Amino acid sequence: MHKSKEKFGMDYSTFKTDVSKRRRSATTRELTKIAYSASKNVVSLAEGMPNEETFPFTEISIKLNDGSSFTLSERELGAALQYIPTQGYPPLLQCLREFQRRAHAPPLWESRDIVIVSGAQDGLSKTLEAIIGPGDPLLVHDPFYPGVEVVVAPHQAELIAIPQDEQGVVPEILRETLRSRQLSGKRMPKIMYINATGSNPNGVVIPLERRKEIYRIACEYNFLILDDDPYHFMHFEDVEPKSFLSLDTEGRVIRVDSFSKVISSGIRLGFITAAAPLIVSIELHLQSSHLHAPTLSQVILYKLLKVWGYDGLMSHFMGIRYFYKRRRDIIATLARKHLNGLADFTEPKGGFFLWIKVQGITDTWKMIMQRGVKEGVIMAPGAAFMKDPSKPCNAIRASFAKASYQEMDLALQRLAELIRGRKNEGISTRPFEDIVYIKRRFWGPLQRMHRYGRSYEWPHFRERDFGEKPVHFRSPYPGIIGVSSATLRATIDQQIRFADNMLKAS
C-alpha cells in the first residue's frame, strides 16, 4: 500500500468505521501494483490478466473539438483495456498530482495522495462508507445533494442539517449546533459534507472568509470536511474561489473532483485528494467493489491532458465557464419574464441550477411530479434536496445546462401556467397528510397496485414500515383538510381490490 507520512499529527483511525479498520488489501491487487512499477526485465506470472492478443480492438482514434487528435496505438490500447492498480493508471495519477499542486497548492502536499474513482458519486460513496457507521451523525447543509443521503441512509446516519443563506452555510449556526450537541452529551460528528462552489441545488459560492471560519470550526470540534467540488471551475465570479484543500493545514479536507461536468459525464472519472492514510482506506473500499475506475477512460483522459497540458486544460475550463454563465444569464432573464409575481430566485453564482421559490404555495411536489409531467415540463421538486423530504417545500430546481434557449423559455412558460393553475384551484396548496395503519399482508397488493398504474395519486410513500406501524401517505384528496383516516383506508382497500382482480385476470 501507500507509504503513509502522517505529518499532520492526526489520528485518522478515530474517523474510520469498524468495518473500514478491518479491511485488508488483496495480495493479487498488491502484485498488480508491483508489476506496474517493476523494471522491464522482471517476468510476472502472478496476475490473472487476459492476453491482449485476444482483444478484438486494434486502434482507437479520437478527434477533439479544437481540431487536434490522438490515437491509442496497439501498445497503449493494450494497457487501456487491461487491469491496473486500484489507485489508478500510474501516468494519469502523476498528471493529477501535478495538477492539484498547481491548481490548489495544498499545504504539506507530500503528506497527501490521490486515488482515481468512477466519478464523484463513487468517491462520495467510498469515502462516506469508510467513515460513517450505523447511527453516526453527519453534518450537511440544507438543502444539499441527495446523492449523499442515498449513501448513508442504509447506515441510519443522523443528518445534522445546517441552514444556508445566500452565501452558503451559516458558520454561527454551525458553531452553535455543535456547542449545543457537545453540552448535551450527544455523539459528535466526524465529518461534514459541503458543496462550496456552485452548490447543488442553489448555485451558492461560499466566500473565502466564510470558508476560513468553517475550517476553524472543523479544527475546533475535530471533524473532517468532505469537499464535493465538481463545479469549482464553473463559477461565475470575478475572483477565483479558494478551495478548502488550499486552506487545509491540519489534513482535515477530503476533496472530491469530477471530470463529469468539465470533460464528459459518460467517461465516469473523478479523483479524491486527502491525507495519505485516508486514501489508503478509500482504496481498500474500491478493491472490494470494482477493483479500479475504467482503464480505457483513464488512458483517454491521460492522453487528453498530455495534448492540452495544464494551460490548455485551464483554457478549456475558462471556455465552459463562459458557456454556462451565458446560459445562466438567459434562464434568469426568462425566469423574470415568466415568473414575475409568481416566484423568487437568486441568480446562481456557479453550477448548473436555478433554485426557484414559489410564492403562495407551500409544497411543489405534486405540482411538479404529477401535473408537471402531464403538462410537458420536468423539473426537480425542492423537497428532494432537503434533510427531511417528507416536509413541504416551496422550491423547485431547474437546470440550465442542456436544454436549448427555446426549450428553457417553453419550460418556464409551462411552469408559470402550472403555478397559476395551482393557485386558481382555490383550495389549500398543501396536500393533506394523514396516518394510516397498514398490515404486512397489504404490501404485496400495494406493490401490484403500482404495477397497474393506479397509484398515480400518491407521488410516493412515506416511512415504509413493514409492520403494523404508522405509514404516511400523501392524501389522494389534495387540499381537502377534512379527509379522515377511515376514508383513506377505504380508498386504499378499493385500490387493493382492483390490483388483486387484475392479478387474477392475468
Image: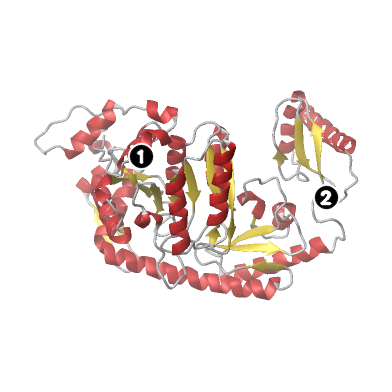
Q: Position of residue 145 (x, y in %)?
A: 55, 50
Of tags 1 and 2, the one toward the viewer is 1
Q: Is residue 396 left or right of residue 473?
A: left
Residue under numbered circle 2: 478
What residue occupies the far left of the structure in this picture?
A: 41
The residue under the point 66% across, 51% down is: 383
Q: Position of residue 442 (x, y in %)?
A: 77, 27
Q: Amino acid at mark 2?
A: Pro
Q: Position of residue 101 (x, y in %)?
A: 27, 56
Rendering colour mode = secondary structure
Q: Amino acid at mark 1?
A: Leu
What residue occupies the far front of the structure in this picture?
A: 183
In which quadrant will I find the N terminus? top left
Q: Is residue 413 left or right of residue 194?
A: right
Between discs 1 and 2, the one toward the N terminus? 1
Is residue 265 among the parts visible in the rendering? no
Q: Nearer the viewer, residue 309 or 282?
A: 282
In which quadrant will I find the C terminus? top right
Q: Nearer the viewer, residue 52 or 39?
A: 39
Query: Residue 500 lies in what quarter of the image?
Result: top right
**Neighbourhood count class around disc 2 (C-alpha, 10 Å): few under 14, some 14–19, many 20 upward:** some
Residue under numbered circle 1: 278
Q: Is residue 172 left or right of residue 282?
A: right
**Neighbourhood count class around disc 1 (C-alpha, 10 Å): few under 14, some 14–19, many 20 upward:** many
Is residue 256 among the parts visible in the rendering? yes
Q: Position of residue 311 (x, y in %)?
A: 28, 67
Tell me how far mark 1 sits from mark 2, CA to CA: 49 Å
* Secondary structure at numbered mark 1: helix
The relative height of residue 236 versus residue 215 in the rendered view (above or below) is below
